[in-house]
Image: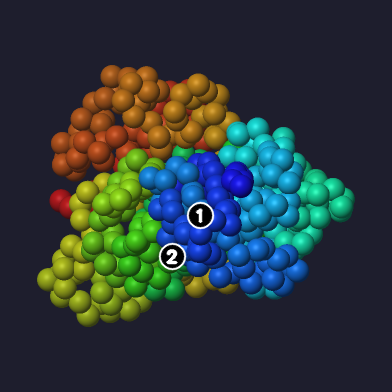
């Protein structure tokens, strides 16, 4: 007898359907064969499944078993095939009527005792099940909240293989897990507040501009000036995730195994801060079986790189594509995978190796050659992709002794949300989400300069020897500054502030 069940495989952050076919025949010598480009964890499922069947008191007669994963030319990885394989064996062996498994989408790892364990990537699998019009999906209780995010799909949480069989046979009644949908975003989250930051008002202004337009930002200042403290509070002034954005982020965390058990959806914007020893693969993703890196885990959120020149040169250079395109393309001999990587980059660095160049309170011990070599660790093309370069000097005593700042995260967030609302209306129906995405005809249309503004920019480009990319960044920044002010057109003061937000362009002279 041949039984067929529906399951799925992951490719990047999406899933495709896999039909698991089991041929169970008592002709010939007993044997077990698995085909369909199954990787190691899938082939090992045989041992887990037969142990789980024995522990659940299911006895299959000796037979010649052939298992096929179709389509046979696409790689299958992971332990999510344990549950469909066990039910396929029971259906093909005559212990479960095959029609009882029709229309059910299955995913789950089996323990040797028959318990159903969670697996990564349930959200994309649930989206696939809904797309395929399945009756419902059977998953581990730890995966149920994640799968229930998908509206229009009946999700059932089953603890053991025996419970699953009883449910399919109608001997046990389970209620579907309530769909959460947008409700999963309702949880309140405590953010760090900019009221805790003494002084550094110009740095807070830069962060407000960055948040309002989705721009990348680099802080340059001595140790202890508050660069990390400023960056850590950025998520608190960003707009809340929309449901579509939350699904995008949750899919990445799900397939990478970073979604906590029992959590249905990522409700806040990610903030990732990898150590400077991170490898290229750790930063942008990859590996034998490609997995998302830190830049993808920061999708729709913030990627914070402290001590930027200390990162490996190769690791920093591979950031250039995701910073420009918002996606990471990983190509291997057997497959090509794309991971979303649209995030804000916030980086911090010292002005020199010792950190105290231009600090009036402490003497810098670095030579000019040492400073030049330190700065040379960052390539021009990488710096051009960072919109704001802002100096963060040491905090003077007057600011340290002052009371809490009146510039709170709530105040800043209100202005950011107002500017983002303007951009949402302006770019409705286009690919742009914020001013940082402006390019081509949209850039020319919405960053149109008057005669005086054109003369100002001509002088700035000539005197500062700005690259074409730097010129575009300044226009985008000026558009954001105008939006924060509520101005319909870009004026000279907006351009001047945008130019002043790129201190490294001035230092090149």
Mark 2 is surrounded, within 10 Å at the Cα level, by few (under 14), some (14 to 19) or many (20 or more) other residues, namely: few
> In this rendering, would 52 be left or right of 209?
right
Residue 15 seen in render: no
The residue shown at (77%, 62%) is: 162
353 or 378, nearer to the observer: 378
Question: Residue 434 placed where, x, y %?
Answer: 47, 34
The residue shown at (25%, 56%) is: 317
> In this rendering, would 206 be left or right of 20?
left
Q: Nearer the viewer, mark 2 or mark 1?
A: 1
In the displayed structure, would residue 337 be above or below residue 262? above
Question: Residue 45 placed where, x, y %?
Answer: 54, 64
Quarter of the view holding residue 108: bottom right
Quarter of the view holding residue 274: bottom left
Q: Which residue is mark 1?
A: 66
The residue shown at (38%, 45%) is: 73
The residue shown at (24%, 26%) is: 455
The residues bearing labels 2 and 1 have C-alpha atoms spaced at a distance of 17 Å
253 or 345, nearer to the observer: 253
In the displayed structure, would residue 103 be above or below residue 168? above
Q: Which residue is mark 2?
A: 40
Q: Earlier in the sequence, mark 2 or mark 1?
A: 2
């Amino acid at each position: 007898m041949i039984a067929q069940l529906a399951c799925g495989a992951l490719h990047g952050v999406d899933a495709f359907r896999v039909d698991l076919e089991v041929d169970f025949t008592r002709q010939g010598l007993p044997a077990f064969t698995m085909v369909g480009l199954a990787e190691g964890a899938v082939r090992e499922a045989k041992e887990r499944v037969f142990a789980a069947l024995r522990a659940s008191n299911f006895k299959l007669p000796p037979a010649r078993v052939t298992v096929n994963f179709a389509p046979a030319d696409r790689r299958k990885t992971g332990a999510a095939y344990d549950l469909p394989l066990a039910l396929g064996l029971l259906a093909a062996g005559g212990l479960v009527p095959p029609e009882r498994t029709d229309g059910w989408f299955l995913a789950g790892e089996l323990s040797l005792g028959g318990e159903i364990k969670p697996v990564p990537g349930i959200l994309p699998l649930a989206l696939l099940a809904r797309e395929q019009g399945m009756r419902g999906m059977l998953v581990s209780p730890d995966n149920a909240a994640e799968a229930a995010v998908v509206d229009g799909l009946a999700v059932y949480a089953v603890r053991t293989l025996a419970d699953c069989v009883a449910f399919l046979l109608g001997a046990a009644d389970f209620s579907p897990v309530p769909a959460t949908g947008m409700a999963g975003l309702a949880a309140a989250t405590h953010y760090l507040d900019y009221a805790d930051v003494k002084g550094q008002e110009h740095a807070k202004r830069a962060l407000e501009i960055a948040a309002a337009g989705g721009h990348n930002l680099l802080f340059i200042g001595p140790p202890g000036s508050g660069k990390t403290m400023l960056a850590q509070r950025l998520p608190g002034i960003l707009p809340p995730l929309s449901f579509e954005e939350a699904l995008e982020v949750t899919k990445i965390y799900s397939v990478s195994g970073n979604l906590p058990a029992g959590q249905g959806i990522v409700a806040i914007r990610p903030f990732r801060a990898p150590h400077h020893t991170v490898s290229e693969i750790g930063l942008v993703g990859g590996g034998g079986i490609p997995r998302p890196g830190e830049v993808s885990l920061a999708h729709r959120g913030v990627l914070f790189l402290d001590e930027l020149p200390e990162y490996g040169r190769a690791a920093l250079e591979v950031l250039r594509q995701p910073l420009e395109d918002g996606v990471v393309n990983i190509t291997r001999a057997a497959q090509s995978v794309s991971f979303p990587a649209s995030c804000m980059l916030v980086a911090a660095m010292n002005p020199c190796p010792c950190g105290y160049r231009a600090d009036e309170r402490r003497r810098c011990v670095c030579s000019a050659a040492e400073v030049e070599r330190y700065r040379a660790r960052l390539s021009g093309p990488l710096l051009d992709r960072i919109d704001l370069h802002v100096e963060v000097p040491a905090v003077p005593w007057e600011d340290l002794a002052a009371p809490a700042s009146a510039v709170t995260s709530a105040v800043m967030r209100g202005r950011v949300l107002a500017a983002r609302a303007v951009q949402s209306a302006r770019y409705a129906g286009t690919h742009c989400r914020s001013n940082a995405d402006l390019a081509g005809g949209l850039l020319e249309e919405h960053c149109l300069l008057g005669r005086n503004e054109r003369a100002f920019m001509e002088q700035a480009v000539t005197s500062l020897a700005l690259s074409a990319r730097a010129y575009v960044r300044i226009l985008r920044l000026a558009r954001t500054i105008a939006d924060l002010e509520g101005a319909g057109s870009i004026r000279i003061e907006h351009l001047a502030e945008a130019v002043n937000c790129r201190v490294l362009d001035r230092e090149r002279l």
